[in-house]
Image (cartoon, helix red, strand yellow):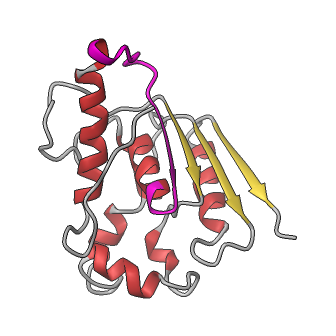
Amino acid sequence: AATASYRLAPKHQFPAAVHDVKAAVRWLRANAAKYRIDPERIGVVGDSAGGLLVLMLGVTGHTTALDGNGGNADQSSRVTCVVNYYGPSDVMKSYGKSVDAAEVLPLWLGGDAQKERHRHVLASPLNWVTPQAAPTLLIHGTKDPYVAHEQSVWMHDRLKAADVEVELLTLEAR
């Protein structure tokens, strides 16, 4: 197992964190022999904001659009599978559904959904789904006050429509 660090907002706005996790995957591949890693079997796990980042890894492995310049450009940032614990899939739809979206998202995206609509669209994994996306397990509770359960339902449905292997594990609130 390896842990990836990433730059945080507001000092470092989108797409810095995405660049960082993609660079971490490329670093793992570049150092696979040294650390006895199978470069064809790199899976990622994340929760909340980290969940969004692993979703981004899972849906953007087929493109270099968000790779950044974090080194090892000769390596792929593609991952084999994704486990997302309650990460958002569409940040545009987080407003009014999350107790802190109106405070947190503008810090990460440089403004609210009206001012920085394009960045909100680009930062939403839901908008990057293609049939090349990695198999994904989504785990989400029904009473999450920070990321609405429907975020995982939307991601599940979009991945399923693209014929990507996906499972949604819903944790019912008691």
Question: Is 167 rendered above or below residue 35?
Answer: below
**Viewed as shown, does residue 169 lie left or right of 129?**
right
Answer with the quarter of the image where residue 29 lies: top left
Q: What x and y, as percent, mark residue 59?
A: 42, 44
| Towards the viewer: 58 or 107 | 107
Judge from the rendering whether residue 61 lies leftward or rightward of residue 97; answer left or right.
left
x and y, in percent, of residue 138 in the image: 63, 49
- Above or below, 18 relative to 79: below
Side (left or right) of 86 relative to 70: right
Point 15% across, 42% down: residue:
70
Q: Quadrant of residue 124?
A: bottom left
The answer to whether any part of residue 63 appears in the image is no
Closer to us: 48 or 78? 48
- Split into 4 quadrants, where in the image is the N terminus? top left
Residue 72 visible in the current orientation: yes
Query: Is 119 one of the magenta-colored residues?
Result: no
Where residue 109 appears, as percent x and y from the top left, is: 28, 74
The magenta region covers 34-50
Rendered location of residue 108, percent (x, y): 30, 73
Q: Nearer the viewer, residue 122 or 71?
A: 71
